[in-house]
Image (cartoon, rainbow, N blue to C red):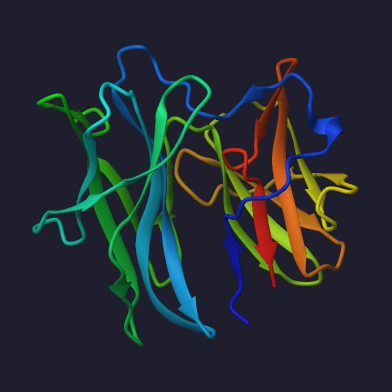
C-alpha cells in the first residue's frame, strides 16, 4: 500500500491542548504583501515505483482585495520559465491568507534522478504586482538520485514535518529554521481520534540533512493503522505549536 502523509481534517486536539499558546501560523511584517511560507520537494511513488517529483508549498499574502492572483514563477532547467497558480487554503488568525501550490510532475528515469527548481512568488492585486523573490536571489530546491542538497525551504514558518514512514511504528523527520540550542521538541499524538493522547520527545539528528536547517527525528513506537499528531516546541519559556494549520498531521498505512 502506498504510504504517504495525508493532510486531512481531524478532530480538534483534546481539552488538555486547549491552552494559551503561540502558533507557527503566519507572522508576516506589516509591509510584507506576499511571502513564501515554505516549499519542499515532493517525491511521487506508485506501488513502490518512483514516478517523479514536484514542488509543493504554501504562501502568505496580505488580503488587499477580493480578486487576486497568486502565482509561482518557476524553472526546472534554468532556461524556460513557467507559471503555476496557487489556490486559496484559509485565512490565518492574523488576517493573512494562506495559499497552497504544486508544480507539475517531473518524471524520473531508471538511471538518474535529478531535481532542480528555481522559483519566485508573484502576487497580482488591485492592478499592482508584488514579488517575493528571496531578496533577488530566488528560491532554489535541488538534489540528485533521491539525495537532497536542499529539499526544503522555510521562510515564514520555523518548522516543518518533512517526512514520515512506517517501520515498527511511525518514524518522522522535522526540519527547523531556529537554531536555539535550548529548545525541547515534543510530538503529541493519538491513535483513537483524540480520545487519549501521548507525548514523545524528538531528538536532534547529529547531521543536518539540509543546508541552514536543523534536522530532528522522532519515533512513535505504538503499532496503529492511523496516527494523528502535532509538534510542540518549548524555547525561551515559550511554547509553540505546529498543528498543520489546525488540521493536524495524519499518517495512514
Quick one: 79 or 101, which is closer to the camera? Answer: 101
Residue 223: x, y in percent? 85, 68
Residue lying at the far front in this picture: please name it: 66
Task: Reply above or below: 175 against 237.
Answer: below
Quarter of the N terminus within the rendering: bottom right
Looking at the rendering, which quadrant does residue 178 occupy? top right
Report the residue at 53% width, 29% height from top: 25
Residue 31: x, y in percent? 30, 13
Is residue 189 visible from the viewing direction of this image? yes
Left-right relation of 29 to 235? left
Task: Reply above or below: 160 against 63.
Answer: below
Left-right relation of 34 to 248? left
Quick one: 13 or 185, which is closer to the camera? Answer: 13
Quarter of the C terminus within the rendering: bottom right
Report the residue at 34% width, 52% height from top: 141
Quick one: 202 or 161, which is closer to the camera? Answer: 161
Left-right relation of 200 to 46? right
Is residue 183 visible from the viewing direction of this image? no
Task: Reply above or below: 134 against 116.
Answer: above
Residue lying at the far top in this picture: please name it: 30
Left-right relation of 11 to 127? right
Amino acid at each position: 500500500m502506498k504510504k504517504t502523509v495525508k493532510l486531512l481534517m481531524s478532530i480538534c486536539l483534546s481539552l488538555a491542548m486547549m491552552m494559551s499558546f503561540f502558533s507557527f501560523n503566519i507572522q508576516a511584517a506589516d509591509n510584507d504583501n506576499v511571502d513564501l511560507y515554505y516549499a519542499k520537494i515532493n517525491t511521487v511513488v506508485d506501488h513502490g515505483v518512483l514516478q517523479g517529483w514536484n514542488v509543493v508549498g504554501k504562501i502568505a499574502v496580505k488580503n488587499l482585495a477580493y480578486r487576486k492572483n497568486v502565482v509561482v514563477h518557476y524553472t526546472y532547467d534554468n532556461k524556460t520559465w513557467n507559471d503555476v497558480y496557487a489556490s486559496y487554503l484559509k485565512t490565518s488568525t492574523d488576517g493573512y491568507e494562506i495559499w497552497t501550490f504544486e508544480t507539475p510532475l517531473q518524471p524520473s528515469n531508471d538511471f538518474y534522478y535529478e531535481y532542480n527548481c528555481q522559483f519566485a512568488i508573484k502576487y497580482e492585486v488591485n492592478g499592482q504586482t508584488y514579488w517575493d523573490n528571496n531578496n533577488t536571489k530566488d528560491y532554489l530546491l535541488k538534489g540528485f538520485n533521491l539525495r537532497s542538497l536542499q529539499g526544503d525551504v522555510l521562510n515564514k514558518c520555523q518548522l516543518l514535518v518533512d517526512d514520515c514512514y512506517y517501520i515498527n511504528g511511525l518514524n518522522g523527520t522535522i526540519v527547523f529554521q531556529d537554531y536555539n540550542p535550548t529548545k525541547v521538541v515534543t510530538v503529541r499524538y493519538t491513535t483513537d481520534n483524540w480520545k487519549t493522547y501521548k507525548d514523545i520527545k524528538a531528538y536532534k539528528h547529529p547531521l543536518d540533512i539540509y543546508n541552514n536547517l536543523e534536522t530532528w527525528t522522532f519515533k512513535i513506537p505504538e503499532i496503529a493503522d492511523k496516527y494523528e499528531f502535532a509538534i510542540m516546541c518549548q524555547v525561551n519559556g515559550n511554547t509553540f505549536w505546529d498543528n498543520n494549520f489546525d488540521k493536524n498531521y495524519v499518517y495512514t498505512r
